[in-house]
């Protein structure tokens, strides 16, 4: 019996290339499908350089997290690493930074889905679509739709197929096979063409390049499912090379097909590039795929944020109420708190319909980077020091710092920086109050065991979070 059980467990383990493919499918989302248009409009064609640099910085974070996971099997999350490296205050801070980053990501995805929907119904206010998508997603998570995991796998395939479809059709248009040679590539030549907004514009767009790789920390956690955990860095390398290749190739095609002045945060650059009298149905088909893929990613994020809230409450880093389940089955209280946050995003869609995507996306990208900084700093404490690991870690931290600072130099991204700063200050104040209260009680809250902990469901993958 033990042998059979062992074999079954081994069958569930991943090979390194499977993790790479899952990472590519799971990372690509609205940050790429819509956020790339915002990056291009701010940084111009040279934004391709930002995507390459962001891939390097993202790999450093993945590598650090994967190595910590491999060397510390009793740990399974960035929260536990932060707590082990710096104390309970860091575990509290890291967990809440991640929670707010996911909440903002969901707000960004809701806004993107609303923008995609207005492609067909331009007269309908954005907040109506945002409220509708939020309500459906909350219902799915509330009732714990078991079949959604399988649907997520199918949607991940659709998402990758959409990108391949864009690459093939764009190449056919440029080659003259479709449209009778109407599309001629407009390759930007010269410094002015590559950097229309100068170095500052590219610097400001850097945050959106990083945002397109958001979610890599979850893939780092998943590395414990590898048959050979030591192959996690290789899986991350291949995954990020694949992502960077897809991003640079597809965005590069969009840049040479569409005039720079046409890019805007309200339309996907890929829908713009495919707009042709000879292919009138293609933009509509692609837009439908973007909605399906975006809703899939948003609902997966909702699963993750719900599980994180329950974990925080169980471990004393949030009110106990949010760990309770209505009728011992439905995460009603956790979802109520999340719903309140989503209502905030919907209200912003009502009050600031012209700028809400830029503001929320910038803040979400910054919160991701703050959490990545926690990961890199924790790695400096927990991993065996070496010259190479030190160079990689500090290179990652510098790239993150550059991306964060760049948001201060553009009117569209600056408000997002202030939103993220306000959230961090709120978390820091709450952290101080909690640690002060625990100090008065004469001890820290002990962690729960791994068994019975909540699960993450990310793009169809069940992922158990080790507890602090």
Image (spheres, rainbow, N blue to C red):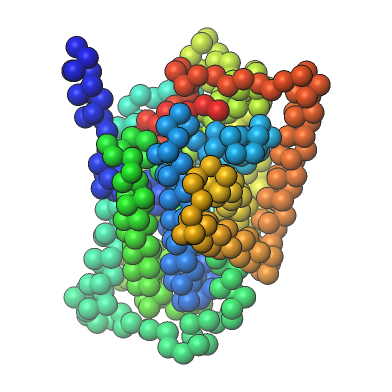
Quarter occupied by residue 213? bottom left
Pick whichever, 5 or 199, lies toward us.
Answer: 5
Image height of 154 relative to 317, above or below:
below
Judged from this view, the residue extending furthest toward the top is 327
Pick whichever, 94 or 147, lies toward us.
Answer: 94
On the rendered structure, is 308 left or right of 143?
right
On the rendered structure, is 202 left or right of 27?
right
Q: Residue at x 33, y 82 (%)?
A: 185
Image height of 239 relative to 187, above or below:
above
Image height of 205 relative to 66, above or below:
below
Where is residue 162 drawn, in percent x and y? Answer: 30, 55
Q: Residue at x 66, y 68 (%)?
A: 410
On the rendered structure, is 10 left or right of 447?
left
Q: Residue at x 62, y 20 (%)?
A: 446
Where is residue 253 drawn, in percent x and y? Answer: 35, 72
Q: How many marks?
A: 0
Pick whichever, 308 or 263, lies toward us.
Answer: 308
Rendered-image quadrant of the N terminus: top left
Where is residue 196 drawn, in percent x and y? Answer: 55, 82
Q: Residue at x 27, y 77 (%)?
A: 174
Where is residue 92 drawn, in percent x and y? Answer: 65, 33
On the rendered structure, is 303 left or right of 79?
left
The reply to whether residue 403 is in sight is no
Rendered-image quadrant of the C terminus: top right
The reply to whether residue 236 is in sight is yes
Judged from this view, the residue extending furthest toward the bottom is 190
């Amino acid at each position: 019996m033990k042998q059979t059980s062992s074999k079954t467990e081994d069958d569930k383990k991943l090979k390194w290339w499977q993790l790479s493919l899952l990472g590519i499918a799971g990372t690509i989302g609205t940050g790429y499908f819509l956020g790339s248009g915002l990056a291009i409009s701010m940084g111009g064609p040279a934004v391709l350089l930002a995507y390459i640099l962001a891939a390097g910085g993202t790999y450093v974070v993945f590598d650090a997290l994967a190595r910590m996971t491999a060397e510390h099997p009793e740990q399974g999350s960035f929260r536990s690493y932060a707590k082990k490296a710096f104390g309970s205050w860091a575990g509290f801070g890291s967990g809440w930074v991640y929670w707010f980053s996911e909440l903002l990501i969901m707000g960004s995805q809701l806004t993107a889905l609303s923008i995609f929907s207005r492609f067909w119904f331009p007269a309908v206010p954005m907040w109506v679509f945002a409220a509708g998508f939020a309500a459906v997603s909350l219902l799915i998570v509330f009732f714990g739709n078991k079949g959604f995991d399988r649907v997520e796998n199918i949607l991940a395939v659709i998402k990758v197929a959409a990108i391949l479809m864009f690459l093939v059709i764009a190449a056919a248009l440029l080659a003259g096979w479709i449209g009778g040679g109407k599309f001629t590539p407009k390759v930007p030549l010269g410094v002015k063409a590559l950097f229309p907004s100068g170095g500052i514009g590219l610097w400001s767009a850097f945050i959106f390049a990083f945002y397109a790789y958001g979610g890599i920390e979850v893939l780092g956690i998943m590395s414990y499912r590898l048959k050979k955990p030591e192959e996690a860095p290789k899986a991350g390398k291949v995954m990020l090379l694949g992502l960077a290749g897809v991003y640079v190739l597809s965005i590069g095609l969009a840049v040479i097909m569409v005039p720079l002045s046409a890019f805007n945060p309200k339309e996907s650059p890929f829908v713009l590039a495919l707009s042709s009298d000879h292919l009138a149905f293609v933009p509509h088909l692609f837009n439908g795929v973007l909605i399906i893929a975006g809703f899939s990613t948003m609902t997966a994020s909702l699963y993750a944020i719900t599980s994180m809230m329950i974990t925080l409450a169980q471990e004393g880093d949030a009110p106990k109420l949010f760990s309770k389940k209505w009728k011992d089955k439905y995460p009603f209280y956790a979802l109520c708190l999340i719903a309140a946050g989503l209502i905030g995003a919907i209200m912003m869609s009502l009050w600031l319909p012209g700028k809400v995507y830029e503001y929320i996306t910038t803040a979400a990208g910054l919160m991701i980077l703050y959490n990545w900084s926690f990961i890199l700093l924790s790695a400096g404490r927990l991993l065996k020091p070496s010259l190479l690991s030190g160079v990689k870690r500090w290179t990652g931290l510098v790239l993150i710092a550059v991306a964060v600072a760049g948001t201060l130099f553009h009117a569209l991204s600056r408000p997002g920086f202030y939103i993220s700063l306000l959230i961090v200050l709120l978390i820091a104040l709450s952290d101080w109050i909690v640690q002060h209260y625990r100090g008065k009680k004469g001890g820290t809250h002990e962690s729960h065991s791994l068994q019975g902990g909540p699960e993450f469901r990310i793009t169809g993958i069940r992922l158990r979070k080790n507890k602090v």
